[in-house]
Image (cartoon, rainbow, N blue to C red):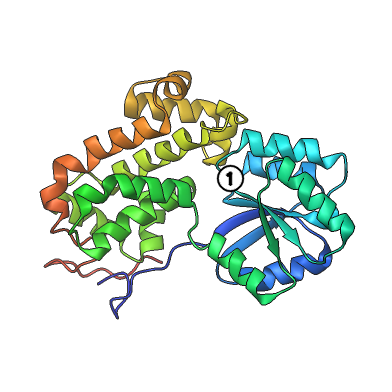
């Protein structure tokens, strides 16, 4: 097995969190997130909001103690524009002022409050962030469950990795590196099994993320193209026309996330169900003698 000589599949990537915190909270969050999530710190709330617009983010952490009166309308706008990105208020001390701010945050749409001054709060953060890109991965895998029920674990894992990592993996070579296999071996296994190419699965998975991002009214076509690491909005548009025969505007209007997931399943999974149930993307085929990708 190319992925690991001991037969261990590669681990999933850590979640990404945008946060505005004070220095004490940063050290506690770093300790809680070790190996589970990484943090992009913003010096101000506006900087953190810009990070949410520019980069794929799985959650937003907001210090209760950094919030000012002027911040609450901006926080309410953030929650409204990005309803699928969890916003979590972090509490590191309890006093009347903090209590009042928690109430204001709740009124602004932030309903998850975690006390990071105690170990149980650290555990709660890790629980919240245990599965990166949870909404996309969970919803797509739930849709594919009927077709993939009974498939080998490494086959299901391939889909989980492709769906999760599609925003930052633009080529099969990068995908193979994450999976720990030789690119040519990976492509050969799909070809020999008469399955669509890994490139096709990866390309469509990126479009699933695009459809999910468009659910947030706060993102433009250029914002989505940038967050999915396309070189330009025009490049994103060319990908859509080549793959689905639609413009970016048509994709946004006519293919909501749920419809895009159905298309993915109908095109790349259901017709190939019998082959996928016996497919081992990390298994050893006769004649495979490559070394793991560097």
Q: Which quadrant would residue 11 be assigned to in this image? A: bottom left
Residue at (33%, 26%) from the top-left corner? 244
Q: Where in the figure is residue 50, as x and y percent of width and height? A: 71, 40
Q: Which quadrant would residue 128 be assigned to in this image? A: bottom right
In this picture, is 76 found above or below 178? above
Residue at (38%, 46%) from the top-left corner? 139
Q: Where in the figure is residue 184, as x and y percent of width and height? A: 26, 57
In this picture, is 69 found above or below 6? above
**Which image quadrant: the C terminus?**
bottom left
The residue labelled by disc 1 is 85
Tally of marks: 1
Looking at the image, residue 222 sits to the left or right of residue 63; the answer is left
Looking at the image, residue 2 sits to the left or right of residue 124; the answer is left
Q: Which quadrant would residue 47 be assigned to in this image? A: top right
Secondary element type, mark 1: loop
Q: Nearer the viewer, residue 247 or 181?
A: 247
């Amino acid at each position: 097995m190319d992925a690991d000589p001991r037969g261990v599949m590669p681990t999933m990537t850590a979640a990404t969190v945008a946060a505005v915190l004070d220095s004490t909270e940063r050290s506690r969050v770093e300790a809680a997130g070790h190996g589970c999530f990484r943090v992009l710190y913003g010096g101000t709330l506006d900087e953190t909001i810009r990070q949410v617009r520019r980069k794929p983010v799985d959650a937003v952490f907001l210090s209760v103690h950094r919030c000012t009166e002027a911040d609450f309308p901006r926080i309410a706008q953030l929650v409204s524009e990005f309803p699928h990105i969890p916003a979590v208020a972090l509490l590191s001390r309890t006093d009347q002022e903090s209590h009042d701010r928690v109430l204001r945050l709740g009124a602004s749409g932030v309903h998850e409050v975690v006390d990071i001054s105690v170990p149980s709060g650290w555990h709660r953060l890790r629980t919240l962030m245990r599965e990166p890109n949870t909404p996309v991965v969970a919803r797509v895998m739930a849709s594919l469950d009927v077709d993939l029920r009974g498939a080998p674990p490494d086959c299901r894992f391939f889909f989980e990795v492709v769906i999760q990592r599609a925003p930052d993996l633009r080529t099969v070579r990068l995908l193979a590196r994450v999976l720990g296999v030789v690119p040519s071996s990976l492509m050969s296994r799909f070809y020999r099994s008469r399955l669509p190419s890994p490139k096709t699965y990866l390309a469509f998975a990126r479009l699933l993320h695009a459809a999910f991002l468009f659910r947030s009214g706060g993102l433009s076509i250029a914002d989505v193209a940038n967050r999915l690491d396309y070189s330009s909005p025009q490049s994103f548009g060319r990908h859509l026309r080549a793959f689905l025969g639609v413009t970016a505007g048509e994709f946004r209007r006519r293919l909501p996330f749920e419809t895009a997931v159905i298309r993915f399943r109908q095109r790349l999974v259901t017709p190939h169900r019998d082959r996928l149930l016996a497919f081992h993307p990390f298994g050893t085929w006769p004649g495979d003698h490559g070394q793991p990708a560097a």
